[in-house]
Amino acid sequence: MSITPQEALQRTIEHREIFHDEMLHLMRMIMQGELSPVMTAAILTGLRVKKETIGEISAAAQVMREFSNKVHVADRQHLVDIVGTGGDGANTFNISTCSVFVIAAAGGKVSKHGGRSVSSKSGSADAMEALGVNIQLSPEQIARSIAEVGIGFMFAPNHHPAMKNVAPVRKELGVRTIFNILGPLTNPASAPNILMGVFHEDLVGIQVRALQRLGAEHAIVVYGRDGLDEISLGASTLVGELKDGVVREYQIHPEDFGIQMVGTRAFRVDNAEQSKAMLMGILQGEQGPARDIVCLNAGAALYAANVASSIEDGLQRARAAIDSGAALQKLQDLVALTRQLAA
């Protein structure tokens, strides 16, 4: 079912939904650069003002996946992505990036999809580079990295070349658009499991249901009530969980896990180097709230990956992975392998 860009724009103005097949058609036109920058900007803004529906988001994500450079992972058991939409403005150290090494050390496999800083001081790609990881790998090399180390970092611009058609529009608009919430839905390795942080509480229910439509197996979407796009230590966290085809929504609190509450200021950094220092301290066994927030998020990802039977079980496994030195070893292994592959 085709729809003209003008018809689509009119729908958004009238706060009416663009249906699935229409959205597929529209999104393909956008990704192929067939719309003018003015029309692209108008539609993106119209969708944002209207508020994107689950159907529109899942259709748009489906098209982004079609146009992506994929990573083919042979064994996808326990494969998980841990990703945030960003845009929470909290300027925390790279919690999910640190968690990657803990997850892999505890028996998960991580296909981490990320880019450079959006609103934070250090994006996941910035953090990986600061740690010495080569992020410019081919899809085949990333698949090998996942098989050998249990971690593959997929630098988003390398996997979504069609995004170049909308990049100038997004940059000039300077406001959030549907693309801010599509990135975490478009893992190039098709990870069946995911821990996703979002920047607004309304997105918890929306994103978990979009993941359901996109065929995810075990998905956990979280929003810290203090605004964090991670499981927070400063407030309760809203959770949307998809498991066995069923969506449940609930809240968790740090004290449920015997963890002391602490505000996000404890995790703030000004640049990638500060983030690296904090991350290395955790992997080297330093105690404190930074370790707690990483272990809790890694624990939830281990539960999403079906390595752990619950978040609590995942938390214990995460702590053990750090204390044994295995998490630090995973970082060293990833640095060594990605440098060897680049040579």
Image (spheres, grey):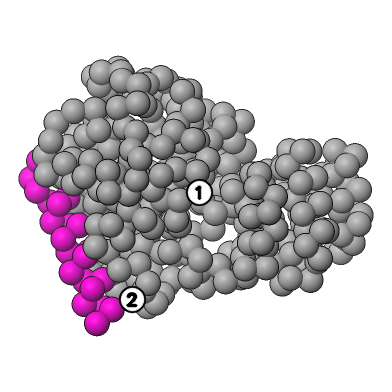
Structural distance between the alpha carbons of marks 2 and 1: 26 Å
In the picture, measured across the screen, residue 320 lies left or right of residue 143, that is: left
Specify start and end residues of the magenta stretch as a single range.
Answer: 323-343
Residue visible at 24% across and 27% down in the picture: 289
- Name the mark nearer the viewer: 2 or 1: 1
- On the question of residue 118 being in view, the answer is yes
Return the x and y of residue 233 as percentages of the image width and height. Answer: 34, 24
In the picture, measured across the screen, residue 20 lies left or right of residue 234, that is: right
Residue visible at 46% across and 23% down in the picture: 226
Dot 1: few (<14), some (14–19), or many (≥20) neighbours within 10 Å?
Answer: some
Return the x and y of residue 81 as percentages of the image width and height. Answer: 40, 52
Mark 2 residue element: helix
Is 126 or 108 nearer to us in this picture?
126
Q: Which residue is mark 2?
A: 141
Residue visible at 52% across and 40% down in the picture: 87
Residue 164's disc is none
In the picture, measured across the screen, residue 52 lies left or right of residue 124, that is: right
Q: Which residue is mark 1?
A: 118
